[in-house]
Image (cartoon, helix red, strand yellow):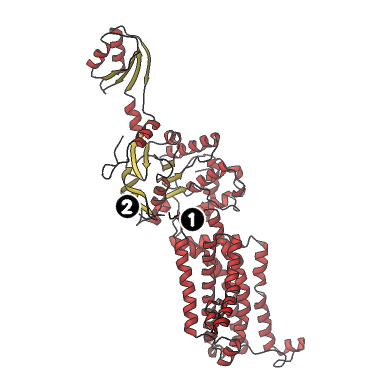
Amino acid sequence: MPAIIEMQNLTVRLGNRVILDRLNGSLSGRCIGLLGPNGSGKSTLINTLLGFYPPVAGGARVLGKEVQHHLRELRAAIGYMPESDAFIADMSGVRFVRYMAELSGLPRSEAMERAHEAFFYVGLGEARYRKLGTYSLGMKQLAKLAQAIAHGPRLVLLDEPTNGLDPEARVRMLQLVREIRDTGEVTVLISSHLLRDIEECCDQVLILKEGRIAALCNLEEERKANLKFLELEVTQGNGFLESVRGLGCECASFGAGRVRIILPDNIDLRQIYRTAAEHEVQIRRMNYRRDTLEDIFLKAMAGSPQAQGSANGRL
Amino acid sequence: MAVYKRTYKAYSGPLTPAWSRFTVLSRYGLANLFASRPFTAYTVLCFIPFLIGLAYIYIVHSSTAAAVLGISVGNAMPGTVNNVWFVGFLGWEVAMGFILAAWGGPGMITKDFANHSVQLYLSRPISRAEYLFGKVSVLGALLSCTTWIPALLLFFIKAELQGHGWLWDNLWMAGAIVIGCLLWIATIALLSMTVAVWVKWRIAATALMLAIVFLLPALGAVVDLILRTQWGNLINLPYVISVIWAHLFRLDSLNRHHGGFDAIPLWSAWASLLSICAFCVWMLDRKLRAREVERA
């Protein structure tokens, strides 16, 4: 899959503070998660990709184009949903989205049509003629999403899209994000500090810490890799572990019958059952253990941010 | 993405030319301004000096109309339609236009700042300059319609009624009308935007604009009085523009002295005006950003 966002030594300084420090990496997922604690540089990275902040060193490419040199083209291809409230309070929802679509270059009639469609799509069809100032927080978030997608962008940047939403609205928002992702026509980048939001939507995640890349990993691959990681609870059986090792597996016993096994690609699960049967070992519990995003995040936060040149690594 | 299908679909239709995007801002800006009835009513009111001027020119040139009204042309009418008359006419127009600008101008930008929507505009394919130009063009169009366009219309009506080569003899005056008004419009529009970007609150921005035009001259007068000088007039924006106008409209020294437009030299008036405009541009460049950086 071609890279959607590439960063080469990207450094951004605001005032005297370095906010993004020599970021290197290539993001190519259909839905990319941007994780990190508050103040780690997530929003700054999004703003830099939009050209709001010029880098003091290095640069970034979005959709194959240099951000600083193709700003107009890129902005036409990007939909942006900011974190904070951003709308015109005394405008009706549909007029606001139409306005934004027209600014993105859509002719009047097309902008109007797509504004209506976007409102129905996000589930605010009935409220589209109400003034934005009268919307609830959840509705405002959805209206912001509508304006971000109305002009049919190729990349949608969502900055904390579930901020302040109640559980029901949050589920609705994430469902929309997944639906947009699954059309295959658009790449979504979500910035959030909520691990579950990222885990539910994203196939790639970039974790930032203190303005540096703490981890960059492909969640899909991590999940697939973790499918070979077994946790067993067995009755004591002599020679079982040795036989499993003989099959080529790595395994470790933790006492009380708890065993962890890493299956090589050529070993089938049935062979484990067969070996257990041969040694008259009962398997009382078995599950595929996989690293959750929380594990990945905690590992990334525990370690020091990657130094220059060693970024872009997998966990 | 059709409504009934409820699915996302990318847009692949035609796009408007990139250069025309600022007109979207102008169109919506005008629509928002005229959504207010008092504002619309006041805009209509701004055309009253034009109607009075039109009637005056007609009466001056129509002995029948003058006779019907019982006016003896040349005695009762205060003066002929010349450069002094046009300066007087434009004086009314720009005064009313200033209130129009102070009322409608700042609100166009303060709303965007109050609602944090500048970042939304600038995340679209428009630059900061285009955003500003879109907003300024609203004021430009409004103030043009209430100042130099009616003045120019009166000028041509006068030329038509007068005949005998009056148009060619006074063509410079048409230039003075256009240049003088455009200069004033550009200054007021820039000032209005700057104040709006700086204050970010419509009422305060309007009050500040009024203060710049009414309180700064008072301050200038105090400076003049205390220091026994005339240079305090440099911070008197209406006066500075009047000095430039006096030269553009070729007011003779008597008229200039009578109007008090000879207190400061022309070059200093231009320098003051250009400094104000340069300051506004600098301020807008600093403040008009999608994201403000808070310096630690």
- Answer with the quarter of the image where residue B220 lies: bottom right
> What is the chain letter for disc 1?
B
For residue B88, above or below residue B119:
below
* A313 vs A307, nearest the viewer: A307
The residue beneath circle 1 is B121
In this orientation, does residue B149 appear? Answer: no
- Amino acid on which disc 2 is placed: Gly
- Amino acid on which disc 1 is placed: Tyr
Q: Secondary structure at mark 1?
A: helix
* A106 vs A123, nearest the viewer: A123
Residue at the spot 68% in from the left edge and 80% down from the top edge: B52
Q: Position of residue A82 (x, y in %)?
A: 48, 48
The residue beneath circle 2 is A59
Q: Secondary structure at mark 2?
A: strand
For residue B210, above or below residue B79:
above
Of circles 1 and 2, the one toward us is 2
